Image (cartoon, rainbow, N blue to C red):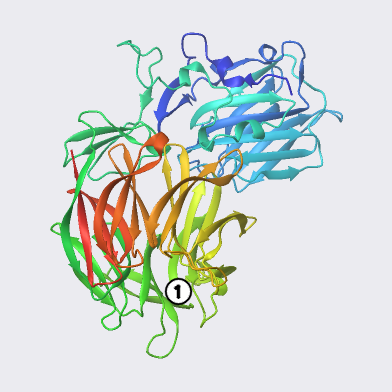
Amino acid sequence: TDLRPLDILSEVVPAGGLAHGMRVFQVQGVRGFQLAASRPRALCFPASRLFTHCDRFPEEFSIIVTLRVLSVPARRNEYVFTLMAEESPSVLVGLRYAPGKLHFLFWSQERAGGWQTRVTFPNVSLSDSQWHTLVLAVSGQSFSLTVDCSVPKDVLVETPFPASLSVKRANFYLGNRRRRKGVFTGLLRQLVLLPGADATPRICTPMNFKVVTLSVPSVLQDLPAKPASNEVLKYPYETDTKVTLGSRPPCTTQEKAQFWFNTSQKGLYLCNGSAWISMLEVKQRLDYVEEYQNLVTNSETMGVEVFTIPRVGLFAATANRYTPPGSAIYKWTDGKFVPYQNIPTYQAQSWKYFTIGKKIFLAVANFEQNDRGQELSVIYKWSRRKEKFVPYQRITTHSARDWEAFVIEGEAFLAVVNHREGNNHNIDSVIYRWNPRTGLFEINQTIPTSGAYDWEFFTIGPYSFLAVANTFNGTSTKIYSHIYIWLSGSFQLFQSILTFGAADWEVFRIGDRVFLAVANSHSYDSGMPAPSNFYAINSSIYELNVTAQMFVKFQDLLTYSALDWEFFSVGDDSFLVVANSFDGFTFSVNSIIYRWQGYEGFVAAHHLPTVGCRDWEAFHTTEGSYLLYTSAKEPLSKVLKLKTT
């Protein structure tokens, strides 16, 4: 366990420069080597440089690789590295990639003449032009591969890795097997041999699993955020820099070192991997909020979904209480929402927009029965010919409150919150899985819920989570809401949090920190004395504690029958807006925008007059940033514009 990592990649790089046949590229904010196929023998070094005290390859070890694979043609193999004896064409140890597979090769000399063993890991998809970190752990007959710190793939073979593999007069070859055929065409950032240990626990600790670092050549290490002077780059590199125009694009590690030009504000921004950093203008700050549009709705509105259909436009779907006239879809036209399509619904509670491949869907959660006495929620599909949403699949639900759509391991899911069946609030909510053969959603799993209001799906690293807001169990609103984690093909309980009439979960990130906010609507328990006010109650913000592997309370905020949280950003500032709906006396209650103040947490910044506020949605257009709120007590929703300085 005290053995040091052996950096194979650094051995090829001469001090103060690059080896012949190597170029440095920066992609998605991360640097790697591109290897030339014309001079494979230039990218090698004797094994004796690494094995200075012993000429035997370790019996137990890990190999850590960070790479970016390009699309590899079918039936082609590319070698990440090989270890070969000078006088032999055989590979002593090697790692090669083929489309959808990873092969580990080793030479066993236990029998006369020896033979080569190939350990194959199937279903390893790396050709997506993204960075990936692989950890291959070897011990005897056991071989384990971990990709981006996901669930390990374990293979047990008949032939164990040799206990005494000689490396005398052997050389390491980087990205090839001593010839031009099979040269690695992608980018290589890290290649480390760790003797005597499984490196997975050392690697799988940070949140950015795809580019974790054990040992990286200095030429590939990131530049400081601010150069000390106007010095020339010590190591020149190439990069696929791109400038995006228009409204604010996402800024993640994938967009790191890319630029965004805000055409309306004439500002240039650089993505640092988590936020856009202003380069040419004073950073925007939220100054005040002004009423921008009064949106007259078909009836009181229980929820709203804002979404963009590519090459068609920006839309808002309102979930309206009464039928007729049902619910409406509005399209953003000339800087306003205008009516676009009416859809018959039955006390609709919410809409959910999602896509599967090229298919575009919009699902409504109906709370009441239709004209035939059937309790159905409906999935609509966008018709490109009609440019309208048309009915696609009807699903039996029970006073449905919410839909949540998500993808896990390439499979599409849709989860419905069933609030109650008759007077029974303790019923199952259902998770459906998309069947690509039938083109329909089918029941995959049921989860017991209590008067539930909301699902919230989120991911942290390779792990997928689903949080449910349980509201009422028939006697009390003081009940546990649950967070589930996806393990072995189903959701399993991860953590339970005591809530008070929970109506909404909102997950958000600030830098590397992950938060989860719950909107508590009211405190009622039939077996307890009534409080002075059922509705003036704390809603809570929880933060993920990575060490404890659980969410811990970060902050309480006094709310008034809170029904929704919405997170949004303006410039470098982060905000939360709460939907306060009732204070025990009136539905005319201020909803509040809270500003993130770092150590102080969230601090009230703006008070917004609302009436029975039910839902908030933040959205952006080329003209600016907006908030849309819906009222469950009057047929009027409002668009507010965020004015910045």
Left or right: 210 as drawn, with respect to 233: right
Give residue 547's quadrant in the image. top right
Q: Position of residue 249 (x, y in %)?
A: 30, 44
- Name the residue located 71 percent from the left edge and 17 percent from the top edge: 87
Mark 1 neighbour density, 10 Å: few (under 14) some (14–19) many (20 or more): many
Left or right: 186 as drawn, with respect to 329: right
Q: Is residue 19 visible in this depiction of the protein? A: yes
Number of numbered discs: 1
Q: Is residue 517 visible in this depiction of the protein? A: no
Q: Position of residue 203 (x, y in %)?
A: 61, 32
- Name the residue located 55 percent from the left edge and 18 percent from the top edge: 43
Where 268 falls versus 470 (above or below)? Answer: above
- Name the residue located 50 percent from the left edge and 76 percent from the top edge: 420
Which residue ends up furthest to the top in the rendered image?
A: 16
Nearer the observer, 32 or 503: 503
Which residue ends up furthest to the bottom in the rendered image?
A: 372
Left or right: 360 as drawn, with respect to 165: left
Which residue is label 1 attached to? Answer: 400
Q: Quadrant of the C terminus?
A: top left
Where 572 falls versus 531 (above or below)? Answer: above
Q: Position of residue 276 (x, y in %)?
A: 31, 35
Where 281 falls versus 636 (above or below)? Answer: above
Nearer the observer, 135 or 378: 378
Q: Secondary structure at mark 1?
A: strand
Give residue 498's quadrant in the image. bottom right
Q: Position of residue 98 (x, y in %)?
A: 58, 41
What amino acid type should be assigned to the residue bearing mark 1?
Ala
Q: Quadrant of the N terminus?
A: top right
